[in-house]
Amino acid sequence: MESLTGCYFDTSVLVPLVVREAVTDRALRFVESHPDNLVLSDFGVAEFSSAIARLVRTEKLTADEGRAALDTFDVWVAHTTDQHRVGSVDIAAATTFLRRLDLALRTPDAIHIAIAERLGATLVTFDRRMAANAEALGIAVATP
């Protein structure tokens, strides 16, 4: 795979980096092959936190496992990624995407796509629908 200038991770890739899932090995290999290009948003961090809390509430993780996952993620974010804040410009762009009636976008996906676009980063996702919508909007996409 060619070298990417920036890899913006959505939650579908973040969770399996910390919680064992069928796609964990693929996610880890992608991170290992792009160690200097990892980009996150504070929105992605919040969405990751929500996903872990949901796994605890649905008893797929214990509370201790959930806390450990959050701690591991926080250390990884602090030492490995370049984090950006979501801004009103991202919400405005996401709203524009959502108002296109030819796309089947959910609000969180539109926000992630808008952030990737603003940063000029490649959107990294396992979500096929999100990837197809991003590509339709002219955003570079990588699926580990």
Image (cartoon, grey):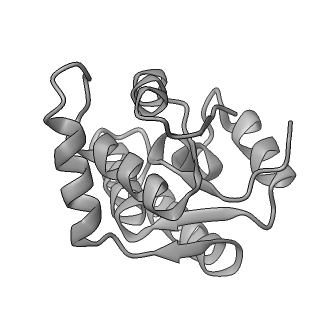
Instruction: Report x, y in % for residue 87.
Output: 28, 72
Instruction: Report x, y in % for residue 65.
Output: 50, 57
What residue appears at the point 54 percent right and 37 percent down from the top-left corner? 125
Q: Is residue 78 left or right of residue 101?
A: right
Residue sitting nearer the eye, 131 or 45 = 131
Residue sitting nearer the eye, 93 or 28 = 93
The image quarter containing residue 6 is bottom right
Instruction: Report x, y in % for residue 58.
Output: 29, 38
Residue extending farthest to the top is: 102
Q: Quadrant of the N terminus?
A: top right
Residue sitting nearer the eye, 112 or 80 = 112
Instruction: Report x, y in % for residue 105.
Output: 26, 30
How many badges with numbers are in the image? 0
Q: Is residue 96 left or right of residue 37?
A: left
Residue extending farthest to the front is: 138
Q: Quadrant of the C terminus?
A: top right
What residue appears at the point 40 percent right and 52 percent down from the top-left corner? 52
Above or below, comparing residue 128 to residue 12 in the picture: above
What residue appears at the point 50 percent right and 40 percent down from the top-left corner? 139
The image quarter containing residue 134 is top left
Above or below, comparing residue 30 to residue 50 in the picture: above
Q: Is residue 128 left or right of residue 13?
A: left
Above or below, comparing residue 144 to residue 95 in the picture: above
